[in-house]
Amino acid sequence: MTTKDKYTEVPNPMSWDATSGGDARFTWEYDEGRARLLSLYQKGKDKQWDAQSRIDWAQDVDPMNPVALPDEFHPLFGSPMWDAADDARRAEMRQHFQSWQFSQFLHGEQGAMVCAAKIVEVVPDLDAKFYAATQTMDEARHVEAFSRFLQEKVGLAYPINKNLTSLLEDTLRDSRWDMPYLGMQVLIEGLALAAFGVLRDMAAPDSLAKQVLAYVMQDEARHVAFGRISLKDYYSELTDAERAEREEFVVDASYLMRDRFRGEEVFETLGMDVKACAEWVDTSPLMIQFRSHLFSRIVPIVKDIGLWGDKVQTAFRDMGVHDMANFDIETLMKADEDQAEDLDKAHAEMAVRAAEVDEAIAAGMT
């Protein structure tokens, strides 16, 4: 079966021709470039991994709770809709919402792959082209991993969310070379990193979903760092008018991303009262906390790269995330990378113990 057979609503057409602006830029300067960016490029090469072999795809997954989340994390938990549902209906609600989340991750990763390739094309500096080339490969691997998880383990997929579509259109259409960085590296990737982290930390310790998310996050931490390094110096040289245009984009994109996680498509697919469900999600303390957490990477990075005017700060106050400006982004990113390394160590130790048991059994049979 193809992905088309697994969609709740088959996209029509099955491909999307998004208008892309900007000129392809070549440079004949092949000097060493910026040390921090070249160091990140080296790290990007060293940290390449194979989604087929690093992830244990033989693990069983409950398709009705594929991320192995507690019920308390469902956005409708405690609502009249949830309380009125029987066990079968709740299982269906779990499956569809988690499938919808991972479907948006999948589509977002394809968007990241396209944007990384565009950065290779439009950015003027060779060191940035080098790193963006490694990121393009990273994003291809992420698309592979999320697609396999949905197709083989869940058996259900959702089309791309309209808010994500709008943000990708705005990012790709803009001809200025820095906009794929700002739209994808800082905003979309920053939000995805936080969303992945919430699910990774809530998922069962030995679940397949936790593996997928932890390993993808190890790459994403580098990608967000790439956006920070590339934009910080450049934005310090902008005119007030140019900076105001970028800040306007940040504000509009932030509201789109916040609303992206409502999940109206799920409620509609399940034949539920979409308005009542959306109102519950908008006012649920758990979901308010979740949506605010999504900006834990974005807010400090936006401040760090210099897009911290009154309009941006007002919008972040309105969303209740302004205080995140003081978060230590380096510590957050280091923790994201460390979790993947810890998983690898745990799997290696388990493999050694399994081999020892097999040896002992074999010795006892001789």
Image: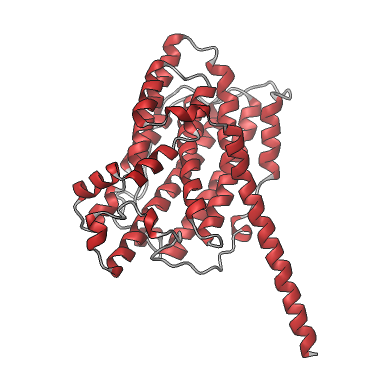
One can see residue 137 in this view: no
Reply above or below: 309 against 251. above
Quarter of the image where one finds residue 250: top left
The quarter of the displayed image where residue 237 is located: top right
Image point (58%, 25%), residue name: 230
Across and down, in percent, residue 206 comes to: 56, 62
* Location of residue 301 in the rendering, given as x and y in whole percent from the top left corner: 52, 28
Tell me if 4 is positioned left or right of 359 in this view.
left
- Among the 4 quarters of the image, the one containing residue 33: top right
Q: How many marks?
A: 0
Up-down: is 282 above or below 74?
Answer: above
Identify the residue at image location x=44%, y=39%: 293
Whole-percent x and y of residue 122?
53, 26
**Whole-percent x and y of residue 268?**
23, 53
27 or 136, which is in the foreground?
Answer: 136
Left-right relation of 82 to 111: left
Rendered image coloring scheme: secondary structure
- The residue sitting at the bottom extreme is 366
Q: Quadrant of the N terminus?
A: bottom left
Q: Is residue 36 visible?
A: yes
Image quadrant occupied by the C terminus: bottom right
Is 217 on the left or on the right of 46, as rendered? left
- Vertical side of 362 occupied by 107: above or below: above
